[in-house]
Structures are given as structure tokens and as C-alpha cells.
Image (cartoon, rainbow, N blue to C red):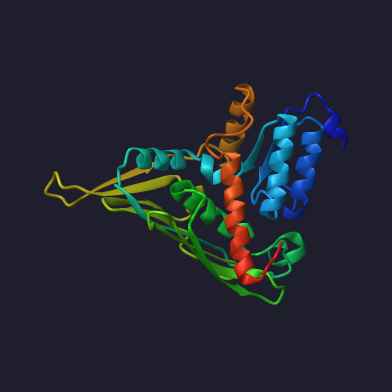
């Protein structure tokens, strides 16, 4: 804890095991240090709320380190959505899966806050929330719990107020396409493998103004250096501007993601 007293440290990046996030963040905030906290932000929404309340009480910056939200390609996706390039969004699909052959790792350890959703599915949930918001009106979830009683693979369906649907899947048992689509009534945005660290995004727009029924725009934006640099740059920008949270990933959105994940696990009978 000596580093918490070091005046040379401007901000702390918390990246230890999931169950330790809350206490580490609270300790940092109490010591007057702003925090960038690795995803998943906490074990549950109650912990997340406690962390957010502490940041507001201490009047300090706090942000979830969901690195995919800050990539240049994600900025392009948000711009296309803002411009209405695919019309009204109707459907979102996101998938994330890796083959973990060793089942003794933290991903399979319930005490370590393991499970496919906490490690991989959180990217898909965050993607859907970025596009459709953090307040779905209906959540349905199905999981396969393994021998260690964590979710080894799962599928989540979210329905939103205008009947938009998001279908999200994750697995620890196989390598999957790891794609994400945002489908509107006039076209589609597609992020190919792996959507959470993509450097290329494709826009397919049905055009009524040309003989060609589809205009395809593929934008490649090379990730300059480690992908994590962009979340660090956003945290630096916020600190320099005196902001207490990022408008790219505000704390209410992080809390909303945790609430969705709580409800999903409740349906599975898995409580953290």
C-alpha cells in the first residue's frame, strides 16, 4: 500500500482478480487516487454501486477499463450509428469464444469470479449496451454450468423498448467466429474476428439511389501499439479536463451492464 501514499502516482490501474476489484478500488479512492478498473468492473451491481458511490464521495475519476470501447474502429461504429447510416437498429449479434483446454485456470474457478460471461461474454454485453442501451425490458438467458459450477458457455437474449433484439453468446469450450453485427432496416455494420479488438469495420448499406443495391464501405484503422493504450489515453484526457467519468463509457452504463449480468446469473442460479 506504499504506492497509495506516493504523490508521483496520478492514477491507479486495477487489474487483479475479479473478487479483489472492489476493495482495491475503494482503497485507492480513499487514498485520493483516481482509478481505471479492469472489466468486469465488479462481481455484481451492488459492489459496482459501492465503488461508484465512493468515487462520487471522494470527487475522483473512476472508469471501467473495457478497452474495446475506446478503439478507433469503435469510434467509427458510433459515428455511423449517430449518422443513421443503417437506418433504425433492429438487431444486434455478438459472439466471443475461446478454447481453454486447461480447466484449472481462474476462468473455471468460481471463487476467482470465473465463468465465460465474466471473462468473455462481458464484451458482448457491453457491445449491445453501447448500441441499444443498458435498460432492456426483457432478459432471457441459458447457460451450461460445468463441474466447477461456473458457466462454461451461454447465450443471452435482450429485448428493448422498441422491440430491438440482442443475441449474445460466449464459450470457454471452443474457438468461435467472434463477430459482431449491428443490423438496421437500411443496412448492417459488421465487425469481424475478433470484434473486441477489431481494426476493420464494414458498412453494408442498401441504397435506393443507385443501380447497385448495396454499397459496401470497409474501413481499416490500424491499432497503433497495444490496444489498451486507447483506454489509457481516455483516462488521461479526462484527468486533464477535470472529468470524474468518461462520456464514452459513463458509470451509469457500467452499472447497467452489471445489473444485466446479475439478472442473467440469477436465471442460471449462479450468484456472485
Residue at horizontal 70%, vertical 55%? 43
Residue at horizontal 78%, vertical 41%? 26
- Relative vertical location of residue 34 with respect to residue 65 in this rendering, above or below: above
| Res 66 visible | no
Residue at horizontal 49%, vertical 65%? 176
- Relative vertical location of residue 22 with respect to residue 31 in this rendering, above or below: below
Near-viewer residue (237 or 219): 237
In this rendering, position of residue 174 left or right of residue 109: left
Please identify the quadrant where the N terminus is shown. Answer: top right
Give coordinates of residue 94: x percent, y percent: 46, 58
Near-viewer residue (12 or 243): 243
Near-viewer residue (227 or 215): 215
Instruction: Name which quarter of the figure residue 167 lies in.
Output: bottom left
Give coordinates of residue 130: x percent, y percent: 48, 46
Please identify the quadrant where the C terminus is shown. Answer: bottom right
Give coordinates of residue 174: x percent, y percent: 55, 69
Residue furthest right as drawn: 2
Residue at horizontal 85%, vertical 29%? 5
In this rendering, position of residue 93 left or right of residue 232: left
Amino acid at each position: 500500500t506504499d504506492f497509495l501514499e506516493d504523490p508521483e502516482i496520478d492514477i491507479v490501474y486495477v487489474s487483479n482478480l475479479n473478487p479483489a476489484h472492489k476493495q482495491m478500488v475503494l482503497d485507492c479512492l480513499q487514498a485520493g487516487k483516481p482509478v481505471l478498473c479492469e472489466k468486469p468492473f465488479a462481481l455484481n451491481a451492488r459492489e459496482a454501486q459501492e465503488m461508484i458511490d465512493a468515487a462520487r464521495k471522494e470527487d475522483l475519476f473512476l472508469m471501467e477499463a473495457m478497452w474495446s470501447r475506446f478503439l478507433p474502429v469503435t469510434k467509427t461504429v458510433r459515428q455511423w450509428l449517430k449518422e443513421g447510416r443503417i437506418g433504425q437498429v433492429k438487431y444486434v449479434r455478438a459472439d466471443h469464444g475461446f478454447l481453454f483446454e486447461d480447466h484449472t485456470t481462474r476462468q473455471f474457478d468460481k471463487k476467482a469470479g470465473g465463468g465465460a460471461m465474466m471473462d468473455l461474454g462481458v464484451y458482448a454485453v457491453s457491445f449491445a449496451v453501447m448500441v441499444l442501451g443498458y435498460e432492456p425490458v426483457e432478459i432471457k438467458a441459458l447457460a451450461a454450468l460445468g463441474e466447477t459450477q461456473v458457466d462454461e458457455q451461454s447465450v443471452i437474449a435482450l429485448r428493448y423498448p422498441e422491440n430491438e433484439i440482442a443475441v449474445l453468446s460466449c464459450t470457454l469450450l471452443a474457438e468461435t467466429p467472434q463477430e459482431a453485427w449491428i443490423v438496421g432496416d437500411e443496412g448492417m455494420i459488421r465487425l469481424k474476428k475478433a470484434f473486441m479488438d477489431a481494426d476493420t469495420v464494414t458498412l453494408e448499406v442498401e441504397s435506393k439511389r443507385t443501380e447497385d443495391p448495396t454499397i459496401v464501405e470497409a474501413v481499416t484503422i490500424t491499432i497503433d501499439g497495444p490496444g489498451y493504450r486507447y483506454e489509457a489515453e481516455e483516462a488521461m484526457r479526462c484527468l486533464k479536463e477535470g472529468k470524474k467519468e468518461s462520456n464514452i463509457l459513463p458509470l451509469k452504463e457500467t452499472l447497467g451492464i452489471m445489473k444485466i449480468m446479475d439478472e442473467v446469473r440469477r436465471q442460471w442460479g449462479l450468484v456472485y
